[in-house]
């Protein structure tokens, strides 16, 4: 039906998404969040990549989906790892936990766009795998 008055709309930046957390999960700002096959966010590097946590969320006492968090789904972020060399520039980055990436793994989180040191890289997020 056509509108005949002002409408309050909900707008979310394309770069931000919202993911409900699995039961017992805590999502810390700036960490990697993964999505299980059931559709709930968790810190375990399995399933698919959800994004980088934008806001703290504590579902440690809740059931699946009781708490949801906003996540950045694009942008370039710095993460820890080990054994990086300049040759890793533009290599795929895989999450190994909620704060660490590597050049091998099962859950791709993006592409290494800057090698800072042997233990730090910047990753351009990529959720379009």
Image (cartoon, helix red, strand yellow):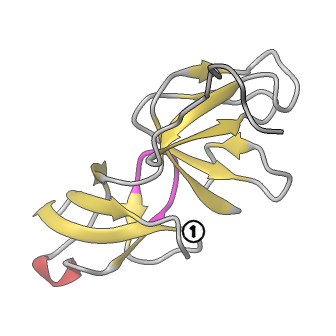
- Write down the quadrant of residue 88 in the picture: bottom left
Q: Position of residue 117 (x, y in %)?
A: 12, 60
Q: Position of residue 32 (x, y in %)?
A: 49, 46
Q: Residues within 10 Å of mark 1 (few under 14, many from 20)?
A: some
Position of the N terminus by quadrant: top right
Give the residue pinned by disc 1: 107
The residue nearer to you, when weighing 49 against 118, is 49
- Count of numbered tags: 1
Majority SS type along the magenta span: loop
Label 1 sits on a secondary structure element that is: loop
Q: Position of residue 126 (x, y in %)?
A: 44, 66
Is residue 38 a member of the stretch shown in magenta?
A: no
**Residue in the picture at 69% in, 42% down:** 41
* 75, above or below 29, in the image: below
- Write down the quadrant of residue 120 in the picture: bottom left
**Residue in the picture at 54% in, 33% down:** 11
Decide if residue 125 is in sight here: yes
* 122, above or below 54, in the image: below
In this picture, residue 123 sits left or right of residue 89:
right
* 63, above or below 72, in the image: above
**Residue in the picture at 44% in, 29% down:** 29
Position of the C terminus by quadrant: bottom right
Q: Position of residue 71 (x, y in %)?
A: 51, 39
Is residue 98 a member of the stretch shown in magenta?
A: yes
Decide if residue 117 is in sight here: no
In this picture, residue 49 sits left or right of residue 52:
right
- Which residue is farthest front? 4
- Which residue is farthest top? 61
- Which residue is farthest bottom? 87
**Residue in the picture at 52% in, 51% down:** 97
Which range is magenta?
A: 94-100
């Amino acid at each position: 039906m056509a509108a005949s008055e002002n409408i309050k709309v909900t707008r979310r930046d394309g770069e931000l998404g919202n993911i409900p957390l699995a039961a017992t999960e805590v999502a810390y700002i700036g960490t990697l969040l993964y999505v299980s096959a059931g559709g709930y966010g968790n810190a375990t590097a399995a399933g698919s990549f959800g994004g980088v946590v934008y806001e703290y969320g504590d579902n440690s006492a809740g059931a699946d989906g009781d708490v949801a968090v906003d996540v950045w789904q694009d942008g370039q972020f710095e993460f820890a790892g080990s054994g990086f060399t300049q040759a890793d520039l533009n290599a795929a980055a895989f999450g190994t936990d909620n704060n660490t990436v590597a050049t091998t793994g099962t859950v791709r989180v993006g592409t290494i766009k800057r090698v800072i040191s042997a233990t730090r890289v910047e990753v351009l997020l990529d959720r379009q795998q």
